[in-house]
Image (cartoon, coloured by chain):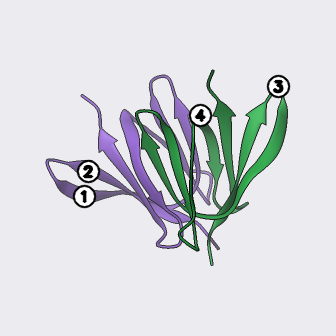
Chain colours: A purple, B green
Amino acid sequence: MCEANAYLRKDGKEELFLENVDRVIPHEDGILLEDIFGRRKIVKARIVELALVDHRIILEKEE
Amino acid sequence: MCEANAYLRKDGKEELFLENVDRVIPHEDGILLEDIFGRRKIVKARIVELALVDHRIILEKEE
């Protein structure tokens, strides 16, 4: 399976935000992440980088 | 490998833009896509949706 882990970058550190992410959908009020089990999380952040082969999604919190 | 194909949506149709995408990096002037061979393409577009398990990146052209 090709899901990825989403990390939230804040103050130069990366924290794991959601594992096994399947879908990433930018919205006006943030980014919607959905994992392979259908669980959803919205975060007010922007996409910094996706590294698919490394299974990494890097987000940065927006204030 | 968990690369994806990037499609550009325009006038309701999706066109294949780049295959085997590894990295997706939003920039001020568009989105930088890099495939697993290191080839890069920049497109003035926004991310509509990433569907990692389906290996699909959907972009929409910005005018």
Q: Which residue is mark 3?
A: B11
The reply to whether the C-beta atoms of the residues labelled 1 and 3 are less than 8 Å apart is no
Label 1 to label 3: alpha-carbon separation: 38 Å
State the mark number for residue A9: 2
Cα distance between the residues tagged 4 and 3: 14 Å
Name which residue type carries label 3: Asp
Is A50 on the left-hand or right-hand side of A62? right
Along the viewing direction, whichever of B42 and B51 lies nearer the viewer: B42
Above-or-below relation of A16 to B50: below
Estimate the x, y position of residue A47 in percent, counting from the top left: 42, 44
- Three-letter amino acid code at disc 4? Ala
Q: Quadrant of the N terminus of chain A?
A: bottom right
Residue A3 left/right relative to B61: left
**Residue for point 63% across, 78% down:** B1
Q: Which residue is mark 1?
A: A14
Query: Are marks 2 and 4 in one subunit?
Result: no
Residue A61 x/y as whole percent: 29, 39
Q: Secondary structure at mark 1?
A: strand
- For this orientation, the residue located farthest to the right is B13
Q: Report, in whole angstroms, how far the alpha carbon at label 2 lies from the one at label 1.
A: 4 Å
Q: Is residue A47 visible?
A: yes
